[in-house]
Image (tube, helix red, strand yellow):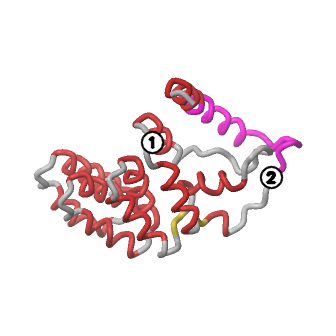
Amino acid sequence: MSAVRVVVVLAAAVAVLPVVLRDRDAGPVTAGAAALPATAQEQRADPAAVRAFLDGVRGANAIQCEVILQSFDSWSSNRAPDRDSVAWSVTTVVRRRITAPQSVPDLVAALRGGDDCAARVAARLLGRSRLPAARGELLSALGDASPQVRRLGAIGLGFSSDTTASPQLVRALADRDAGVRAAAAWALGAVH
């Protein structure tokens, strides 16, 4: 698929998806789109799905990554009749809470791995997981030698809604890197 075609498809998805989701939420499910029962398992992302999702976002260009990141708040329905259950399970990692501690090492490796999109996604997933190990890794990231890792550590803490991280975020406001300072300021606002 050419780069232009990818951009057009992604742009169409960004423009059309919110309308479809709004219409879907406003009305009943049509006869052709039978609702699938939501189970407790569907609400949790298992480690294999987390790894597959991170592998899927590696190498994404900036536009693709922004679309991926925006999907955290507007991913498609599990009720679509043409849904690929394996692809849906992987792509909806962004909507699920990471509850398996075994996922934390994969997320940390992605956070520190050098791929910008995978690192950004990992920071958000670590923050939203609320696992103590994930919080510890994000706090540790604030002291990393890499400004990108420090910045993403602050962003992840912002997604955690954990006000107990405020002292470390306040210290990050004095970081030598402007991007880290900006992320720490944003994170403080997000958790309070």
Q: Position of residue 141 (x, y in %)?
A: 26, 64
Q: Which residue lies under the disc numbered 1?
A: 60
On the rendered image, what quadrant is the C terminus found in? Answer: bottom left
Q: Position of residue 82 (x, y in %)?
A: 78, 43
Report whether 35 appears left or right of 185: right
How dense is the environment of label 2, judged by Cα within 10 Å: few (below 14), some, or many (20 and up)? some
Q: Earlier in the sequence, mark 1 or mark 2?
A: 2
Q: Position of residue 116 (x, y in %)?
A: 35, 47
Provide the secondary structure element on which disc 2 rests. loop
Q: Position of residue 171 (x, y in %)?
A: 15, 61
Q: Residue at x 32, y 65 (%)?
A: 138
| Above or below for 127 versus 27 | below
| Above or below for 43 versus 118 | below
Q: In the orientation shown, which residue stands out farthest toward the right?
A: 31
The stretch in magenta equals 13-35
Q: Which residue lies under the disc numbered 2?
A: 35
Q: Nearer the viewer, residue 140 or 4?
A: 4
Q: Residue at x 65, y 51 (%)?
A: 87
1 and 2 marks in contact (CB < 8 Å): no
Q: Amino acid at mark 1?
A: Ala
Q: Residue at x 32, y 72 (%)?
A: 136
How dense is the environment of label 1, judged by Cα within 10 Å: few (below 14), some, or many (20 and up)? some
Provide the secondary structure element on which disc 1 rests. loop
Q: Main secondary structure of the magenta part?
A: helix
Report whether 14 appears left or right of 106: right
